[in-house]
Image (cartoon, rainbow, N blue to C red):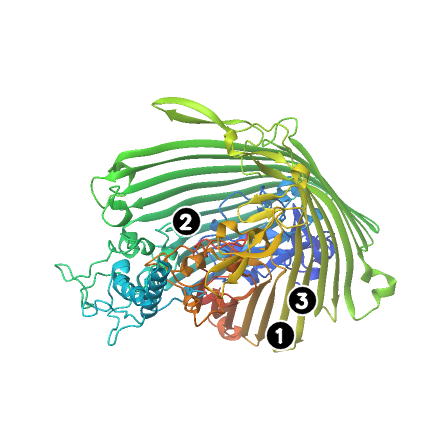
Amino acid sequence: MEFSFVGYESQQLKATSTNLTLSLKPSSTDLEEVVVVAYGTAKRTNITGSVSTVSSKAIENRQVSNITKALEGQVPGLQSVASSGQPGTEAAIRIRGIGSINASSSPLIVLDGSPYAGDINSINPNDIQSISVLKDAASSALYGSRGANGVIIITTKSGVSSDNTKINLNFTQGYSTRAVRDYDQVSTDEYFQLYWEALRNKNLSNGLTAEQAASNASKTVLTDLNINPYGSQYPQPVGVDGKLVAGAKTLWDDPWTDVLQRTGVRTQADLGFSGGSAKSTYYISGGYLNDQGIAIESGFKRYNLRANLDSKVKSWLNVGLNIGGSSTQQKYPQSEDSNTANIINFTRLVPSFYPYYERNADGSFVLDGAGNKIYDFGEYRPSGATPRNNLAASLPLDRNDIRRENLSARTYLEVLFSKNLKFKSTYNVDYINGNTHDYTNPLLGDGVNTGGYVYRSNVRTVAQTWNNLLTYEKQFGLHYLNVLAGQEYYDFNSSNINGSRQQFVLPYFDEPAAASQLNNFTGSSAGYRLLSFLGRAEYNYDNKYYLSTSLRTDGSSRFSPAKRWGTFWSVGGSWKLKQEEFLKDNTTIDQLTVRASYGGQGNDNLGTYYAYKGLYTIANSLGKGGTYTGRLATPDLKWESNLNLNVGVDVSAFENRVSLSVEYFNRRSKDLLFTMPMAYSTGYTGYDANIGALKNTGIDVDIRTVPVRNENFKWNLDVNLSHYKNKITALPKDNKPIITGNKLLRVGGSIYDFYLPEWAGVNPDNGLPQWYTADKDGNKTGEKTSEYSKAGNFIAGTSLPDLVGGIQNSFTYKNFDLSALLSFSLGGQILDNDYIQLMHSGNNPGRAWSKEILERWTPEHTQTDVPKLTTDNLNWTSSSTRFLYSGTYARLKNVSLGYRLPSDLLKRIGVEKLRVFATAENLLTFYGHQGMDPEQTVNGATYFRYPAMRTISGGIQLVF
């Protein structure tokens, strides 16, 4: 009999009695590891496709609230980008490039063997046994259309037969700050002198003499900025020479970060019980997480429970139930756009000479009758400094809550007809009930004008999966055969209602019932179904030659009946050269395998559940109802196709102390699901069609080494690298390029090629900005213009990196352990729209200025990249290559140091393990452009987002 378990070496044992006792050893080499694959498990050396794994050890005690953020730098071919540091947000994941233009490029998430439609936030990382990433057709085609962009299989922990129940307690306490310091800004003194210069230059351009221009500027500075931080004794703090007058000093300096940002506190506690008998095993756990954000009124809380039960109720019948539930609350103030209520952007845009508490002329605080400071809402502030707003005062009275109740259940029944034939039926359900509550108070801030505002929404989703699989497995001498056939049905239903009201009669009541004016109310529901039939056959001869093939047919309700069905397939093979006579006795090489696979998959995820139907919008016109066409019918819309080639070699040598895996991949997507733009005069923005094609080609490298291994000390060094090129190979209308925002889709380019005016520097003669012009064919002329509207647009690189990867070091010395993970991304461009706001020429008085503005053009400083200052709008901060920056960075994602108390000491008090540790997340970031967090969205544009957090924690792990 052969026994196997995820992460351990398989072991064969002769059945000599009815009761057998054995202990599996942790895998000493990744090649011998048992890993989770589509609808089952397999030894890594027997896999013909491309599968990478992340063990529980690599993610346990990681200080992340969402498991997707723990994958960066751990898997070759996987690009994980956490563009927002808001606790509870997830990272965008792409596997081996970008598979589509308009349709989804996100991988399928599978939890305990079934596709997962629940909230990824509900999964506690400490409940995870392993994560498998399926990257090619041979490994993922059995999931059909849903696995076209790769598959991430999450397997939670299960119990192990034991005489005693194992109790595992984990507790961590930590503190969070910004991982990257925000953009440096000029001081108050510098700001007033620079703004004087902008006014003076404007006056000169209006024809005033130098003396008149200077005198007028000195008089106008305070008028425009509407504040005098130097006190009333200095009515003109900037003299006609552009310098602060003698004796002028600021009476206050109030960085808004002092009141809008904080050191976040992070607390996590997990308790687990596991064990079982010869016939039944169990794993039961509970967890609590409170992850406080660095911005006030932001954070994420989670309470979770899990119970995984397996039982052999008869010699021929196995049953099991995995059930997980969670309740989460995400406090999510505005932090993702240019809205004035964006708490991250507010601290950046308002200079520190505008106080957050009201000040007297002498700089002292204005106090109310009770002696308390009074928040300053800046009625006097110019538009550039966000007047009539003080988030430090209003946010604590507002609500920005997202609450979700999650339930996920997986249950199975397995019938063993014989030792070779078994049938397994599983039923799975994922349920989410989400409630959003946004409330703007009527007392302070934006809500004063509307008497307060409240928005409530409820979204309920239920996803059900039922599959039935028949598996035949037999060894015929040197021949091994495994055949699987089955059926799967997926049903997804979503319903939502939402509405808003305003005009609260009484303060401190935040429910809609307390507001008197109804603004709107609406609701809808949607359904999606997928019926599938699937099969797989695996064969090997003498454990040397492996062949696998799979076939799956999916019928999707997104498409019309005539186009509904798609068939997807794969074929793969591998050859274990180490088993051949010419290598069998080689003592240096422990394992050598070459493998290849090819297959076709599909994609139906266009973002709508009614991809082929014409839809209508119901509207109110002068009190009467009516309809108008909202979406054109597209009955010929069909599956997007994805053809995937993978060729790889795996080698392990020197007693498994060095292992190397190198893979080449070629993903070709055709019949792309794309929204074709239409002229606005037609009344439609576009229609959906199957057009165009693209490909992703690249190489993945995974290196695992053990440089030092002796009785007391061990050092593991792992490196993974991934390089790919994304290229569009066909477009509609004779391959005519398509402009989408600041990107250009063109044959031969990537889907994220920037298309921007090219910066030509500052004119040294007059200090004006310059851009290159284009001829009628769009080619660069070499001529320059200072009028932005006359600038030409040109290809300016891509947001996609040239190389991504990670370096993992782990050391153990006696009872000490130390590990460090460095993730990196080399190449690619980022358009920094955040920084643009801080680089105005003076035409936005009151708006903060970057330190770089000190390098502006002056008659004495003509060789610079910053134009002259003036209150005229030079349009120089409009999008151009001037604000494209390198996306290259490296981030020390995690460092952990632990100490395990001696086991002989612990046994005396009945403790199996006691480990104390310190861990840091996002400890260091190495990058080029100061202030910009380099970990941005895949499309390469900043958007005033919540920054990444650095979290440093201490903890204890106790096992009884």
Report the label total.
Answer: 3
Q: Is residue 133 above or below residue 176?
A: above
Whole-percent x and y of residue 483? Answer: 74, 42
Sooner in the amino-acid sequence: mark 1 or mark 3: 3
Tell me residue 250's x, y (percent).
26, 70
Q: Residue 653 carries which label?
A: none
Q: In which quarter of the image is residue 356?
A: bottom left
Report the amino acid beneath label 2: Thr
Q: Mark 2 points at which residue?
A: 328
SS label for mark 1: strand
**Residue positioned most to the left:** 369
The foreground one among 832 and 151 is: 832
- Disc 3 target residue: 704
| Secondary structure of residue under mark 3 | strand
Mark pair 1, 2: CA separation: 40 Å
Query: Residue 714's mark?
Result: 1
